[in-house]
Image (cartoon, rainbow, N blue to C red):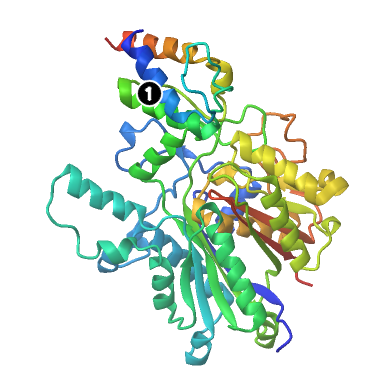
Amino acid sequence: MSDVTNDVIAIIAKKKRVDKPNVELTDRLEDLGLESLDAVEMIFDLEEKFDIEISYNANTNNPRSEFETVGDVVKMIQKLVDKKS
Amino acid sequence: MNSLNRVVVTGLGAITPLGHTVPLYWEKLKQSASGLGPITAPGHEELTQKIAGEVKDYDPLKYFEDRELSTLDRFSQFAMIAAREAVAQSGLVFDRPLSLRTATILGTGVGGQNTLDDAFRRLYLEKKQRLFPLSIPRMMANAPASQVSMQHGLRGPAFVVVSACASATHAMGLAFQMVRSGAVDCAVTGGTEACVSFGTLRGWEAMRVMAPDMCRPFSKDRKGLILGEGAAVFVFESLDRARARGAQIFGEIVGFGMTADAADLTAPDIDGMSRAMIGALDDGGLKPQDIQYVNAHGTGTAVNDETETKALHQVFGEHAKKLAVSSTKSMIGHALGAAGALEMVATLMAIREDIAPPTIGYLGPDPACDLDYVPNTARPMKIDAAISNSFAFGGLNAVLAAKKFV
């Protein structure tokens, strides 16, 4: 797995609220129990980790629909990281 | 024990994004004016957030001597300006006996945020070794209560109440209870906030709850809250005392309810909101159908407005559909610890003039928000009794009920 994948999985693993030993790319954020503040904290951690800016408004963005799975988050981050370099 | 006093309002003062006095502010509210605009606070160029409700055309030297300002953060200045207007309007002269029986109770969300921001900038950015000598007494959260008490020589109980966005309503509720119980004869009370500073805005940006352009409470396509600032201060007085001196009476405060959600730090809670509203109604001897107008907390976030609507349904039942519900935050933004006081001005004036101020920026109904929000235009209507809602982060809720004085 790429570094981005590992890092994203580590960040999401910190925020999950369900008892599941490994976070996988196919896991849905909803099934991991991520609540709205968890999502805001996740976005912050991702921005800090990758030195990127993620446009996100908790009123209009729904992380569970825009990023259904962990893999979706990885894709989004990879895109932003590629754009930066 | 003495019988309870009736509590009336004999003075109002305000400094707001829509004007520096109550008459100017209320006139603009009735005209559906917006006090929101481009942020001018230092450092704004770097912010993602571009819009806030700042107090505009504000020159502190119009209100204060230069040397006084070294002790006054912007939030204290606002409190003092609003208190001067309220006290002048009340016609009260605080001789020694009255000064001993007058409370000063104000709400604020954080404290002297501009002073704190300046201090941190100096220390961490400019690498200066020392701070201004009066940084601490400027930024302490109780500063506005101290400054207002000193300004008018008020020697009774004086303190500041801190409960985020419900601070002012908690402060006014306590003032109401103290005048009602006879613990004091008068109270100078309200709330103040000067939160449009770089550091505070960065904090709110990080929460991802601010709208980029407009605050549209209860509307479809609402995108969040907008910060505001300002202060509103009132003189609460026992009816007997106000009558005895022939004071002009602007309305009566009749009930106060407060609750804690004991649930989530930031997510609002129908039960906590409902119990606070019911508490205010019961305390004031009001039935739900006695209320015509609700000044909502109405922040413009997706979740607050939906939850508040559900709580209104729960409390008012069938009568909810007949209520006029509006959010003053649509016009001045969310002034956090001052919000409840700025909104109590709107509530009292609505009762006094029989006009419900509007919720501006309203684009159309959201299925989750199905009440009458007085969209975009003020409405003349009979208003005998109203409530004003304040629901804070931390799950702390406060509601005041007011009535036309007859």
What is the quadrant of residue B172 in the picture?
bottom right
Is any atom of residue B355 visible in this view? yes
Q: Which residue is at the front of the view, B163 or B156?
A: B163
Q: Quadrant of the N terminus of chain B?
A: bottom right
Q: Amino acid at mark 1?
A: Leu
Residue A61 in percent (x, y) is at 55, 23
Residue B338 position within the rendered picture, expressed as x and y whole percent measured from the top left: 51, 56
Q: Which residue is mark 1?
A: A46
Q: Is residue A13 above or below residue B63?
A: above
Q: Position of residue B151 (x, y in %)?
A: 40, 76
Regarding residue A80, the answer to whether it shows in the image is no
User: Which chain does the residue under circle 1 lie in?
Assistant: A
**Image height check: is B305 above or below B132?**
above
Pick the front one: B207 or B365: B207
Residue at the far bottom: name it.
Answer: B97
| Count of all numbered marks drawn on residues in the image | 1
Q: Quadrant of residue B137?
A: bottom left
In this view, B394 is above or below B348: above
Q: Residue furthest right?
A: B318
User: What's the residue at 59%, 61% (across, down)?
Assistant: B169
